[in-house]
């Protein structure tokens, strides 16, 4: 019987919830009620013509319950940041793992180059070849994942969904609202890409967030052996803080 709080895990681009959160599905079910939604366009959901992080944030907000701990990876991290700002009273904590929200670090050379490269790839990349587009995207984000060829049906659907995502470099993250929210925030990076480092540095500073750096797994630091224990410890601290707030 699960006795812990709800942990809502939001996946990013290309792969759905089960592969993205495989280590959490293996290591955390005894500690939390895991809620792993499959975002629009990802199997078993049907293909979509457009993915917009603002619409995804609205859908996520509708899913949240009071006391949830929200965790978002990559594009899912952008969605989680927006949902958390929209519903600050619902959450007990927020964890953002390498969100490509480049505007928060606008003016930093690495973040600016990353945003410009993304816009070029979406405009000029091989949109008629989902596998080639995916491989270029993986290089762009600094992923060490080697996709099979040909792609599995799930990966092909994920690649086709990637093609229709609104670029996260357009996301306006309401940092002031998040900084004023009552819940604590954890920002996680993998020490593999200067743009993600810059974005996470800004989030850490502006949100007065805890920071966790887990090298060795590129853009998937949630696969690091230390991640689950660190997340459990953070959630436990957040639960204690929430109990103090309720007691006031």
Image (spheres, helix red, strand yellow):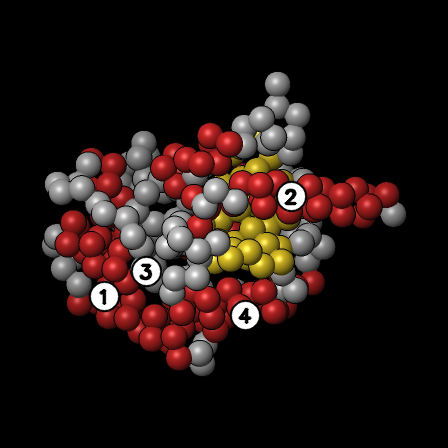
Residue visible at 15% across and 54% down? 132
The Cα atoms of the two marked residues, 1 and 4, are separated by 25 Å
Where is residue 235 shown, x and y percent of the image?
65, 43
Residue at figure coordinates x 19%, y 36% from the top left:
152
Tag 3 residue: 141
Looking at the rendered image, the quarter that the N terminus falls into is top right
Distance of label 2 from label 3 (alpha carbons):
28 Å
Residue 180 in the image: x percent, y percent? 69, 63
Q: Label 1 vs label 3: CA separation? A: 12 Å
Tag of residue 202: 4
Instruction: For marks 4 and 2, give the one nearer the viewer.
Output: 2
Tally of marks: 4
Measuring from the top left, give residue 112's x and y in whole percent. Answer: 38, 76
Alpha-carbon distance for marks 4 and 2?
23 Å
**Which quarter of the figure has residue 181?**
bottom right
**Residue under label 1:** 121
Q: Quadrant of residue 53?
A: bottom left
- Residue found 61% across the figure and 69% down from its top: 206
């Amino acid at each position: 019987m699960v006795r812990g709080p709800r942990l809502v895990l939001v996946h990013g681009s290309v792969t759905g919830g089960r592969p993205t959160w495989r280590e959490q599905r293996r290591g955390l079910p005894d500690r939390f009620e895991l809620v792993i939604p499959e975002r629009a366009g990802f199997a078993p959901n049907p293909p979509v013509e457009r993915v917009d992080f603002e619409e995804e944030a609205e859908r996520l907000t509708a899913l949240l319950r009071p006391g949830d701990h929200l965790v978002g990876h990559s594009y899912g991290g952008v969605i989680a940041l927006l949902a958390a700002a929209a519903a600050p009273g619902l959450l007990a904590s927020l964890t953002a793992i390498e969100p490509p929200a480049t505007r928060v670090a606008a003016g930093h050379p690495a973040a600016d180059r990353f945003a410009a490269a993304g816009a070029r790839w979406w405009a000029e990349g091989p949109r008629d070849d989902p596998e080639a587009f995916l491989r270029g995207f993986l290089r762009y984000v600094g992923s060490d994942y080697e996709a099979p060829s040909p792609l599995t049906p799930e990966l092909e659907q994920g690649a086709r969904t990637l093609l229709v995502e609104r670029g996260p470099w357009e996301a306006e993250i309401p940092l002031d609202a998040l900084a004023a929210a009552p819940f604590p925030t954890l920002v996680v990076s993998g020490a593999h890409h200067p743009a993600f480092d810059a974005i996470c540095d800004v989030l850490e500073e502006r949100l007065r967030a805890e920071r966790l750096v887990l090298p060795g797994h590129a853009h998937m630091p949630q696969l690091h052996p230390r991640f689950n224990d660190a997340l459990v410890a953070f959630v436990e601290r957040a639960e204690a803080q929430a109990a103090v707030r309720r007691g006031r």
